[in-house]
Amino acid sequence: MPYPIRRILACVDGTPEGRRLAQASAVLARRLNARLVALWGLRRPSPSPAETFARGSGPMHEVIAREAAASAELMTQARRYCELAAGSAGVAADFRPVWDDDASPVPPAEAGDLFVSCHPQLRDQPDALSAERLLISSGRPVLILPGAANPDPVRPLLVCWNGSAAAHRAVEDALPLLSGSGSATILVVDEAASTLSAEDLATSLRERGVKAEVRRKASGSATVAETIAAVAADLDVGLVVLGGYSRSPTLERIFGGVTRSFLAAAPRPLLLSRVPDHVVRGQAPSAEAAE
């Protein structure tokens, strides 16, 4: 049984791209009947050059008071944007301000079922809310929307399949989104997975009402990431489903890999899921990982 998406955490801000992402996330929340939490990025006001020379308790107090007032105004405006974006989709949103210098913007109690992020990363979002950081540290799937484009539930989906634990996890996490699509193509590049496992996946999806077919593709002189992107363009898919970091993120940083390639350039909506390291190694989770 797929895990339902009950809580969506949207990493947004007040830029035009961020506000479009907030609207797209609200539409998705309405479609999935999920609660929307807007992690709204805010850039902390900086004192002017003249204010940095303030001396004495009086002038310093005035500078602090002006910065506090400016921060409050930013939050008021951001909350207004959030309400407009959510209201346009007919849903309510929980507003959570996140400052650009915040190293831990998502407490464990605030964790949701799906993160929604933008490509490229929004200007006022802290690095801790980048798609890669969320994928590695949160244990939740990350939906990346290039240019804040909403995934089209009518267009077909592309499931990238190599039989790994990460690919299995990605399919499970994508099932609430797959159920809204009429068809899905299961893509096996080169000899990444057996024909039997791909056909078993297709049968499983068909049992859930998704018209699924298996396609095998040789990469030839292209990379695996380039081959996936080419097939996605040929089929004009609405969403690419990919198991992230089947091998360690450190190895991909050194040698490159499919996940790193798609994080660097996401040409269309992309759902990434990753199996935490302690699960892959069969270890008990640490207290930090359990959070």
Image (cartoon, helix red, strand yellow):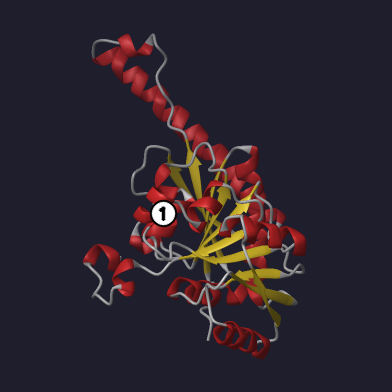
Q: Which residue is found at the position 65% from the left and 57% from the top? A: 229
- The answer to which of 92 and 182 lies nearer the viewer is 182
* Dot 1 amino acid type: Glu
- The answer to which of 97 and 19 lies nearer the viewer is 19
Residue 246 in picture, x, y percent from top left:
43, 66
Residue 104 in picture, x, y percent from top left:
34, 49
Q: Is residue 120 left or right of residue 150?
A: left
Which residue is tagged 1? 252
Q: Quadrant of residue 276?
A: bottom left
Which secondary structure, mark 1? helix
Q: Is residue 230 above or below residue 46?
A: below
Residue 231 in picture, x, y percent from top left:
70, 62
Mark 1 nearby-residue class (10 Å; few <14, some 14–19, many ≥20): some
Q: Is residue 266 left or right of residue 62?
A: right
- The answer to which of 260 and 31 lies nearer the viewer is 260
Q: Quadrant of the C terminus?
A: bottom left
